[in-house]
Image (cartoon, grey):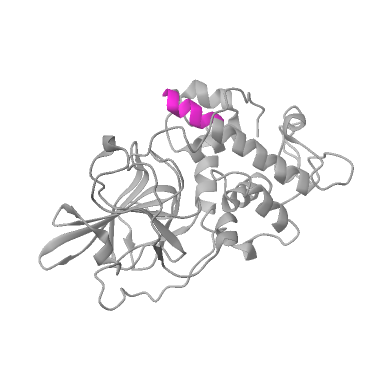
Amino acid sequence: MQSSASTGIGCVAGFVACLLGSFFLLPVVIFGGGNADQAAAGQLNTGAVPALYLPWVLKAGAMCDAIPAPLIAAQIEQESGWNPNAKSPAGAQGISQFMPGTWPTWGRDDDGNGKADPFDAGDAIMAQGRYDCSHADLMAGYLKQGLVHGPLIDLVLASYNAGAGAVLSAGGVPDNGETPNYVKVINALIAKYTKALEDSGAVPAGQRLAAPLREKALITSPYGGKRPSSAYGYHTGIDFGVGLGTPVHAAGPGTVTFAGWNSAYGNRIVIRHPQQDGKSVESTYNHLFSLSVSKGDTVGVGQVIAATGNTGNSTGPHLHFEVLYGGQFTDPGPWIGLN
């Protein structure tokens, strides 16, 4: 990583108004499994993390909503391959690869051994969490001002690798021959460190599509009606409030027709499913943290395609799920078994 300025920090969760309106909780709990503690841990695949470092990854991943534990773990693998004694030719040190000039700003004696040391894994991983969370706030502020563009997580990772100044100068991920690949590799590794969930591989009887989540979730905003903020008008889908990094599943078999960035929806996936009653069927998944599929991919029902996030015009981590029938938005509830 490189040293960087850390001024101008704002608030990640509040940097833009939600395209789909502010959340309001409905007393509806859907889908099974999970609990609040698991959600806070970001659905980490604990078996993929070396046991010695697991407590620190969980702690660092609970510092802020923008940086969940699977991201912390994926970043460590890319930085050092989990080697606490790693040294780079550029002088970066330890499991999280802090530069000597940057370490004093972020390093603390988190493991309580009397010294703050980048070669102490606990100290380094917690410093990594602090750095990432702080720069998530910083990049969110830049996004709000229109100074940078792209997914927030990509900007944070680029800042860790190249420095916040380089990201600001480039207006996004700098094309310096190293940072774009760094960001790409870590995004791909996130799936490895996200807890896998079993699925039956079939749409449940009596439903047209399967639920896109397997974790406990609240409907934070229903389909249709007048929104709490009238500026956003009719709500075209259902919002499910879940922790950042929750696995998102394909609601049915089909082909991915879009997988990428949208200025309003953030990271977004659109799947075209087989026709029903002679009409086209599409499902969309929005404000995602990371994507596990690409345009043109064929997916099966229940396949993990992404992780929930807070990208685009969003006020907090959630999944905005839509169904289009015959090219028109329709209430997803009856399609996935919600009455």
Nearer to me, 175 or 153: 153
For image coordinates 32% across by 64% down, the residue present is 251
**Which of the pair 176/217 is nearer the observer?**
217
Q: Residue at x 63, y 23 (%)?
A: 5
Identified at 39% across, 46% down, the residue is 23
Instruction: Give the x, y percent position of residue 286.
Output: 36, 49
Q: Is residue 336 left or right of residue 42?
A: left
Residue 178 located left or right of residue 222: right
- Percent x, y of residue 111: 82, 48
For residue 207, above or below residue 16: below
Q: Quadrant of residue 43?
A: bottom right
Quadrant of the image occupied by residue 147: top left
Farthest residue toward the left? Answer: 278
Up-down relation of residue 261 to residue 207 (above or below)? above
**Which quadrant does the N terminus fall into?**
top right
Say if residue 282 shows up in the picture.
yes
List x then y, in percent, for residue 207. 26, 72
Q: What secondary structure predominates along the stretch shown in magenta?
A: helix
User: Which quadrant is the C terminus positioned in?
Assistant: bottom left
* Residue 178 visible in rendering: no
Furthest residue in direction right, as rendered? 114
Residue at 25% of width from left, 77% of height from top?
206
**Numbered range of the magenta stretch:** 138-146
Kindly give the residue lying farthest to the bottom in the view shown: 205
Q: Was residue 29 drawn as part of the magenta stretch in this picture? A: no
